[in-house]
Image (cartoon, rainbow, N blue to C red):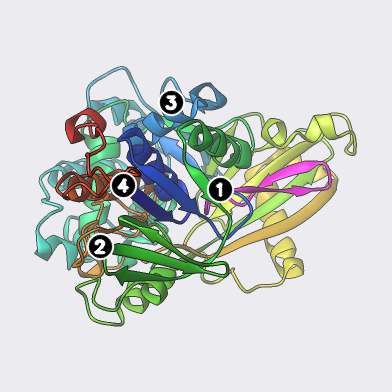
Amino acid sequence: MTPRVAVVGGGLAGITAALRCADAGYAVRLYEARPWLGGLTHSFARGELWVDNGQHVFLRCCDRYLALLDRLGVRDSVRLQSRLDIPVAGGGHQGRLRRLPLPAPLHLSWALLRYPWLTQGARLRFVRAALALRAVDPTDPRTDATSFGDWLRAHGQDRDAIDSLWDLVGVATLNARADDVSLSLAATVFQIGLLTDAGAADIGWSRIPLRQLHGDAAAAALSAAGVTTTHEKITAIRRAAHGWTVAGATGETAADAVVSAVPPAVAQAVLPPDAVDPPADWAAALGSSPIVNIHVIYDRRVMREPLRAGIGTVVQWVFDRTDASGLHRSGGFPAGAQYLAVSVSAADEFVDRPVSTLRREFLPALEQLLPAARGAGVVDFFVTRERHATFRPAPGTARWRPPAATALPGLALAGAWTATGWPATMEGAVRSGEAAAAEVISHLAGLPARAGADGSGTPEPRTRISEVIR
């Protein structure tokens, strides 16, 4: 009889794990409590408009996420810059972080020479700090225990340099400011993204709603792979005499192995108490950090670029969502209207503010960042909030991030919050799903064959691990 794998959680981690296990020849059932797949990367309908819950971007270095898009057949539905190009504005200055066709770190030399927020001395100190960061070992426990902000100041970086350059990239990718970030995770981001491969930080984003890119495409790919998807909330994962059971509203279902791909607080609630090695309060200790998105529809075009970053303003990043949302196809907005989404990471100070307050704060800030917005009419203004968007990447975080393998054979963990070595990104989620699938496949490959349907005990043919985990 073909071994059975239960995957609990239908985000990118669970989708990845389910496809890997199905490709290995196992009978896979994926459980997702919500009526769609995609987890924290989803969309909802607002009238005729498709609204992403947040502006999710990826970088060229996110090779496992790009491989998942290939597997889902939607690679042509994303846009990836041919060359890193970030228009930056704030404090009366305009600048651009655009890479040259040179090896890293020289690829950003021209952009730094013209970067108006740094003095000549600050530029030289930035280069020295960047070269020193290349030598940091992210796997050293002492690195994880160190604050990135403390490290930057020790290497000559003042507040202006941190705010205008280091946090410009770091806040968006780590969902925390330099003082609140583990040096280990910050070093990973900057080493992989900016300091090693010149093209690694080229930015990509979806050209269609995330519901279509991830959820709908995953549903089709999972079905084609033979995965059964059940939209049911799982309340417990339990050990059984011959494997595992997952319990939900409709009862318990047996499985030979389980991948838990749910958020940390949910995982702690449904997993056996001895599954994870850290102390009982590990999920609370890991914590979470919010992201707020401000959505504004203007009656005319106010931004020409697809994205822009802000310095010294509440508008951290702003993206043009006009085409992806279907704005012009909806018929309910003025001809030439533009839909902008402002992404605010590390948003603790904003997440509980009323929409009216956020409107008073962000519309004037957008007008400062985008002069064309000053005479434009606001057709719509609304806010989306992810209160637990990511784990908090604080110093010492590594000890609270469990690996894919648990203390219980046949049970694996997935999720961007697990010990992937990456921050909480779509790439980290996919890598975690791959790691969890590898654990399950390895475990099942070592099990004795269970009796077949005819009682013969003949083992089912299985795909070798090396053919699946590449």
Q: Which badge, 3 or 1, is on the more N-terminal residue? A: 1
Q: Secondary structure at mark 3?
A: helix
Q: Secondary structure at mark 2?
A: loop
Image coordinates for residue 3, horizontal then vertical, percent = 31, 47
Q: Which badge, 1 or 4, is on the more N-terminal residue? A: 4
Give the numbered dot on residue 3.
4
Amino acid, disc 4? Pro
- How far apart marks 3 and 2 lie (CA) works out to 32 Å
Q: Nearer the viewer, mark 1 or mark 4?
A: 4
Q: Which badge, 3 or 2, is on the more N-terminal residue? A: 3
Residue of label 2? 182
Q: Nearer the viewer, residue 276 or 116?
A: 276
Relative to 73, is 53 above or below?
below
Image coordinates for residue 311, horizontal then vertical, percent = 50, 50
The magenta segment is 38-54
Give the numbered dot on residue 37.
1
Q: Secondary structure at mark 1?
A: loop
Amino acid, disc 1? Leu
Q: Nearer the viewer, residue 139 or 221?
A: 221
Q: Are marks 3 and 2 in contact (CB under 8 Å)?
A: no
Amino acid, disc 2? Ser
Structural crowding at the residue carrying mark 3, measured as other residues with C-alpha within 10 Å and reported as few (<14), some (14–19) or many (≥20) = few
Give the numbered dot on residue 70.
3
Residue furthest toward the top?
A: 101
Relative to 27, is 469 above or below?
above
- How far apart marks 4 and 3 lie (CA) works out to 27 Å
Amino acid, disc 3? Asp
Q: Residue at x 29, y 40 (%)?
A: 120
Q: Quadrant of the N terminus?
A: top left
Structural crowding at the residue carrying mark 2, measured as other residues with C-alpha within 10 Å and reported as few (<14), some (14–19) or many (≥20) = many
Horizontal relation, residue 211 to residue 227: left or right = right
